[in-house]
Image (spheres, helix red, strand yellow):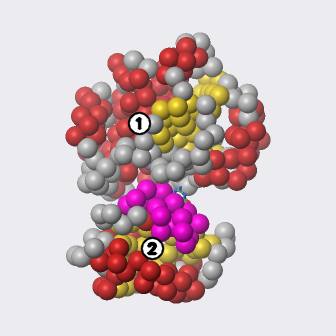
Amino acid sequence: MIKGQIKDIIQILSSSKHIVIVPHKNPDGDAMGSSLGLYHFLKYKNHLVHVVAPNSYADFLKWLPGDDMVLNFEQQPETCQEKIEHADIIFTLDFNALHRAGDELGRTIQASKALKIMIDHHQQPDDYAAFMYSDVKMSSTCEMIYNFIEMLEEADLINPEIATCLYTGIMTDTGSFRFPSTTSRTHRVTADLIEKGAVNHQIHNAVYDTNSYTRLQLLGRAMQNLEVLPEYRTAYITLSQEELDTFRFKKGDTEGLVNYALSLKGIIFAVIFIENRQDSIIKISLRSKGQFSVNEFSRAHFNGGGHTNAAGGRSYLPLQNTVDKFISILPEYKEELSQ
Ligand code: 5GP
Ligand code: MN
């Protein structure tokens, strides 16, 4: 779905503008890849561009070209507010509702008079942007940034930096090209990005083969905590704050753990519950295979959302109570889960 006219955007971008790009809170590979890919493109087009990340992100993304230019709203609120106040255009990338940038940053964007452009692939997007490119069928926001640059008739300008950023987000959001959202078009875009300078094996290595010893030990503990509910074809993992502390948890260390639960033979619904004492929440990641919508499940029970097969959420109950609540809900879904 596209709301607004691309020819208007081409016209607006034909002279130098102050532009701010915002990914969602706790930005992942797709959020940072799309933000920095677009950043390099707009810089090349002589705009004054800033990426404002709501908070920090995992070390395995800290090598992305332009990473050193990213502003952090949590750490530098005044600088970020000032950039947003001076912005002619704000791009919001890889999220569907302003609160997903964090409450305060979301309100700041809402209050800004800048032209807002949303590019995103999450379900049920809010209608806050003048120009909106939203498509839940897309593998990633990075693939959409590629399409957006193509709509601007500028695909020739994609350089190795842009290609590297966009490749990274496509790779991480498709689980390395294995999720059903990976289409022949995704592979064509990816092939073009490789031709334009993305070095695929180096990117894979930088993201996936830079584990710390303690992260692998944490993975071991998570696997010990794995529980299976065969009658619901469901598996879940818990990690308490104490366990995270034992293995010197750092941001990004729990990324992807839920997929191990989903890799069990016969399992179609997998969840990880991660205690976060600082924020007094249990962070929940939900994944599924096939028709079962974890977006709907998380929206209905765990204050979250996302996509059909990948969603996030949170609980304000203690860890064990959250798990008990989860188990008590499953009978409602028995039929869907046994299909
Ligand atoms: P994760 O489990 O990795 O945090 O999130 C999985 C997917 O769901 C990601 O695409 C993420 O952006 C999305 N997501 C996570 N939490 C929320 C949420 O609270 N609301 C919505 N709409 N999407 C979410
Ligand atoms: Mn994404």
> Which residue sits at x=55%, y=18%?
8
Q: Position of residue 104 (x, y in %)?
A: 73, 50
Per the image, label 2 sits on a secondary structure element best described as strand
Q: Is residue 284 magenta?
A: no
Amino acid type of the residue tagged 1 in the rendering: Met
Let me know if residue 39 appears in the view. yes
> Which residue sits at x=55%, y=44%?
23
Residue bearing mark 1: 144
> Which residue sits at x=30%, y=85%?
230
Tell me the number on the disc at residue 272.
2
Let me know if residue 204 appears in the view. no
Residues in magenta, as a range: 295-313
Q: Position of residue 27 (x, y in %)?
A: 52, 51
Rendered view: 315 above or below 111: below
- Count of marks placed on residues: 2
> Which residue sits at x=33%, y=63%?
291
Q: Is residue 302 magenta?
A: yes
Tell me the number on the disc at residue 34.
none
Q: Between label 1 and label 2, give the one nearer the viewer.
A: 1
Towards the viewer: 151 or 221: 151
Q: Is residue 7 left or right of residue 102?
A: left
Q: Is residue 34 left or right of residue 172?
A: right
